[in-house]
Amino acid sequence: MTSAETAYPEALPLPAENPFAARWETPFRLPPFAAIKPEHIRPAFDAALAKHKDEIAAIVADPAAPDFENTIEALERAGRALSRVGGVFYNLTGADTNEALQAIEREMSPIASRHWSAIMMNEGLFARVDAVNAKGAALGLDAEQARLLERTYKGFIRSGAKLNPEDKKRLAAINERLAGLGTQFSQNVLKDESSYALLIEDEAGLAGLPEFLKAAMARAAADRGKPGQHAVTLSRSIIEPFLTFSTRRDLREEAFIAWSKRGENGGESDNRAIVAEMVKLRAEKAKLLGYPTFAHFKLDDAMAKTPEHVRGLLELVWKPAKARAAREAAELAALAQSEGENGPIRPWDWRHYAEKVRQKTYALDEAVLKPYLQLDRVRQAAFDVAGKLFGLSFAERPELVGYHPDVRIFEVTETASGRHIGLFVGDYFARASKRSGAWMSAFRGQRKLDGETRPIIVNVCNFAKPAEGEPALLSLDDARTLFHEFGHALHGLLSDVTYGSLAGTSVARDFVELPSQLYEHWFLTREVMRNYCLHAETGEPIPEALIEKIEKAQTFNQGFSTVEYTSSALVDLAFHSLEAPAEVDPLAFEAEELARIGMPAEITMRHRTPHFTHVFSGDGYSAGYYSYLWSEVMDADAFNAFIETGDVFSPAVAEKLKRYIYSAGDTRDAAEAYTLFRGRLPTPDALLEKRGLAA
């Protein structure tokens, strides 16, 4: 190994024109996006995989007795080149993909799976990890080192390190197949989303729509080569307000069915067979690893620990949510009948009549509220709250080039010292090359092993892009989403740990949503709304009366919201609680589970199975969609810690929040971390009160 390779482990032996051949000397070592082409990716992956194999082989071949440094820390050092390539590639495939990148993604998913299976099932490597783990307390490790050893050892066990050779081979084959299926699932959903547009050519089709929505639909049509028309797309920032405001029931029905049937339209993009195979393979994987079901396997490494605990929380919420939804449905039906619509409320009607009830009950009109929610100001509010709570400053760096013209990049510093904390990348507008939803990811994570490495964190959303020169206006839900994803971003930016595998959001799945959901609370405080919700045309601050209406309406429609979410979580849990499924018809199984729980006919799951990317585009939230509710138990209680002081920016509470939650990564057990912050574990009481479901 040359001295250059030692100094710059992320550099790869590639032709000089490949950007991955050298250490990036860009500001903050930001990926040189303009120079990275699809043709550079596959050679970079091949070289990075080979380099990682060599690094692993060197650990196994080390003649010295296994110890923490030459085995556990050596594993932490290995694979940095692969992380750099993957950090760029997988972020692009989610946020700005194309056919060339998708082809590479399909090629790489089984290759990457084989690579990681070979490492995690390597007998010589596990023997060294096992030997270090056996020494336990005798090693004299500090708390973070002990946690790293614990997590590394458990990771090998959960990856099949103790299986016999035949079972290892089968598990590797299952993992490889699941990786390929997950990639195809995600690409199929994106294909259905990006290929659909309900084009409206006449004014009659726009009946009831506010100007902000018509402008967004005009922009969407123009982007699809249809200037002068209006397009209803399957981006939530367009489809949901269309379903809310359109008085054309026929068009609402047509658009809703297209939205609901993503992934089940027949042809190459149909996901039903993929779901059936994934459920079967996951159950087999769990059995190989000694668990009765895949849900038991996944939850064993989460806060919840067992499917029974998860089901208990979901059913605790389900009963009052369903009762409240029934009352809401009756109210909507009464309003519809008063307007001459005598049929039952259908799923494409709910948002439309709910908005009318909200206006009637609370005098809160989304079209009136929206001009006060400018994207730039809501984002600045998120930045300034982080300044008050955690002492951070954000400065846009327009000279830094992102991967798309819409991307904006900000340097994050510590206000008091000016110390560089990281880069924050904001990518907010919907486009055909971006998968739906909103998420946080990292181009580079934080670590301090072998010198300080600061993170590059990205938030990706799908807000409607405004006409040229016009401000982007958000809905209340959009604004909450921005704060939610920024909470995740802070979890990555504030990370302050030694080992990268424990950094930032690398925590239990049902704990990872706490920092994000907790952060949402600050947007709705009067301190934030008064200062940042200024009218887009007049500059006037949001009226106090409107803030009061927002506050009073917080529990409005919560029966609907809780039912559509909880039903999705229950269906996810049911799929992954199957012990030995032979053949599963996904839609029939979904229908059976919904019938079992008594799903209201007026509401559909938030994510129906054929497009449930949280669960089937990878293993991230499989048997884990409940996590949002589990974390909500904590976030409702955690914000009360501030409320109890009389100061929503209490420095003492914020300092504990930063120390034990936002900056600590996975350096301790999640329950211990929460208890250190709050002094106790929470009960569901605050959650039920927050959602208006308390008895």
Image (cartoon, helix red, strand yellow):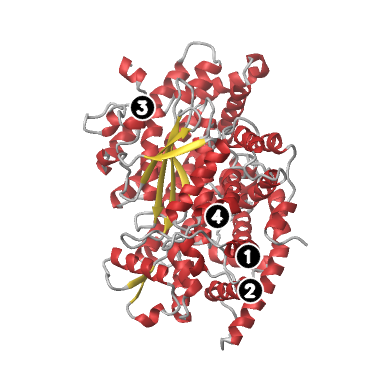
State whether residue 47 is above or below residue 579.
Answer: above
Q: Label 4, label 3: how many angstroms apart (C-alpha)?
A: 47 Å
Q: Label 3, label 1: how many angstroms apart (C-alpha)?
A: 51 Å
Q: Label 1, label 4: how many angstroms apart (C-alpha)?
A: 18 Å
For mark 2, give the secondary structure.
helix
Evaluate if marks 4 and 3 touch, with contact meaning CB atoms under 8 Å apart. Answer: no
Tell us which disc is closer to us: 4 or 3.
Answer: 4
Question: Position of 257 compared to 431: left or right?
Answer: right
Which is nearer the N-term, disc 1 or disc 4?
4
Evaluate if marks 2 and 1 touch, with contact meaning CB atoms under 8 Å apart. Answer: yes
> For mark 2, does the 10 Å Cα neighbourhood hold few (<14), some (14 to 19), or many (20 or more) residues?
few
Question: Position of 170 compared to 641: left or right?
Answer: left
* Residue under label 4: 530
Question: Position of 575 compared to 454: left or right?
Answer: right
Q: Nearer the viewer, residue 88 or 247?
A: 247
Q: Quadrant of residue 672?
A: top right
* Residue under label 3: 10
Q: Residue at x 61, y 81 (%)?
A: 335
Q: Position of residue 19 (x, y in %)?
A: 27, 33
* Residue under label 1: 553
Give me the disc on residue 361: 2
Q: Residue at x 48, y 69 (%)?
A: 367
Amino acid at the residue labelled 4: Arg
Evaluate if marks 2 and 3 touch, with contact meaning CB atoms under 8 Å apart. Answer: no
